[in-house]
Amino acid sequence: MAAPPRPDSVALLDRFVAALLARGVVTEAEIAEQVARTDAASPEIGARMVARAWTDPAYRELLLRDGSAAAEAAGVSMAGMPPLGVLEDTDRVHHLVVCTLCSCYPRAVLGYPPHWYKSSAYRARAVRDPRGVLAEWGTVLPDHVELRVVDSTADYRWMVLPQRPAGTEGWDAARLASIVTRDALVGVALPKAG
Amino acid sequence: MRFAAGSAVRVRRDFPETRGPCHIRTPHYLRGLPGVIERPLGAHPNPEDLAFGRPAAKVPLYHVRFDQPALFGEGRPGDTLLVEIYEHWLEDRPMTGGPTARRSESVGQETA
Amino acid sequence: MSDATPAPATHDLGGAPRFRCTPVEPDDAPPDAFGKRVDALRQILARKGLMSVDELRRGIEAIPEAEYHALGYYERWLRSISGLMVEKGVVAAEELRP
C-alpha cells in the first residue's frame, strides 16, 4: 500500500492552501471541481476506444494516426492535454509503457496512474527486466513476440491498443470494452475472453 | 528535421547533470547508445528551458528504437525499447552494428 | 570513452540496480484525499499560467535523494509546487513555515 502522507506534509498542504486562498489565487470550490473532473477519467474511456477500434476499421485507423483526435471522437476533451499516441500490438510485437523519469501516463483516457506505475521498482525494472515484470502480472509472451518497452519521456502520452483475443467473435462493443483493463492498456496484461 | 525514419543515430554521451542545475528528458541509461529512428514526432518546446521558465525554442522530437540486450545485457535478444528523444541529443551513426533499419510492424502516431 | 560514467540523477531510475530485485507492489488504489488535493492544485495552477509540468518536474528532481525516496508521490509534488510558488512570489516562504 502507498503510505499515508507524513504529518509535516499534511501541515504543509494546509498552510499552502491557506496562503493560496488568502491571496485569492484559488478557491475551495475550484479545488473541489478539479478533483471531481479528474475523478471522472478512468480506464473505461480507454477501454471503450479500444473496443471501438476492434469493431470499426476507420476508427482504428484514426486511433493509430492521431490518438488525441480519436479521444475527442470518444467524447474526451483533450484541450490542454498532452498529445495521445497509441501503439498497436500485433502477432509479432507487444508494447509495455513505463516512464522511468517521472510518471507520464495518458491520464485523459486512463485516469490517475496507479501506485505501481509510479513506483521506483516499476520505473527501474521495466526497461531492464521487462519480461520479469510481466511475469509478476502472470503475463508470459510467446518467444517469437518482440517485447517493445516504451519509455515515455517527453511530449506524448502512450496507450497500448492490445490485440482482440480469440473467443470474442460476435461480441458487441460494450462487452468487448468490459475485458479491456487498465493493465492491458499499459501493457502489463493481455485482454482475455473469459 | 534532421533525421528520417530508419536513420541510424546515437544518443549523445553527455552528462549535463554533473555540471549544475538542469532538467533533462534523455534517460541516463541511453546516453551513448546506438538506436534507429522509428518515426519523427513533430517539434516541441525544449523542456530543458521550459523547466526554468525560459523562452523555449521548438525542437524536433523522434521515437527512437534501441535493442534491449545492448542496454543492460539482461534482456532477451529481439526485444526492443522505444523512447522519445529530442534532436539535440542525437548524432549520426554509421550503419554498422546496433539496431538495424528494419521497419516495425506497429503503426503509430504521425507527426502533427 | 574511457572516462567513468557519472551516476544518474535520483529521479532517473531506468535500470537502477538498487531496485533490481524489488517486486512491483500490485497496488491499484486511487490517490487518497491528500493526493487528490495536491493533484488538483497542480492542474489549477498550471491552467492559470502559474507553473508548467516541466517546472513541476524540475522541482521534484531538486529534492535530495534520501528525501526523494522517503516521500510519497504527492508529497514530492507538494514540495515542488509550493517551492515554485514561493520562487515566483505567488506565496511567501514565511506563510509555509510551521
Image: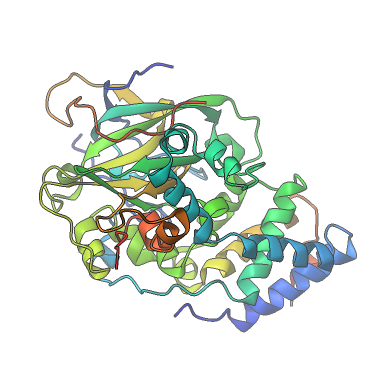
Q: Nearer the viewer, residue A167 or A107?
A: A167
Expressed as whole percent of the image width and height from the top left, the position of residue A131 reads: 20, 58
Name the image colouring.
rainbow
Q: Is residue C30 left or right of residue A76?
A: left
Q: Nearer the viewer, residue B12 or A148?
A: A148
Query: At 29% from the left edge and 63% from the top edge, which residue is drawn?
Result: A192
Query: What is the quadrant of residue B19 in the picture?
Result: top left
What residue is drawn where x is 47% and y is 58%?
Answer: A174
Q: Position of residue C61 (x, y in %)?
A: 51, 54
Q: Position of residue A36 (x, y in %)?
A: 70, 65
Q: Give left or right: position of B37 versus A6.
A: left
Between B89 and A165, the residue placed more toward the observer is A165
Residue positioned most to the front: A170
Asked whether residue A15 is in view, the answer is yes
Q: In the image, residue C17 lies at what x, y percent?
A: 25, 61
Quadrant location of the N terminus of chain A in the rendered image:
bottom left
Q: How many marks?
A: 0
Question: Does A74 sit above or below residue A114?
Answer: above
Whether residue A117 sits left or right of residue B38 in the image: it is right
Asked if residue B25 shows in the view, the reply is no
Q: Residue at x 13, y 42 (%)?
A: B78
Question: In the rendered image, which quarter contains the C terminus of chain A?
Answer: bottom left
> Based on the displayed image, in which of its 4 quarters is residue B108 positioned?
top left
Nearer-the-camera pick, A146 or B82: A146
Q: Quadrant of residue B77?
A: top left
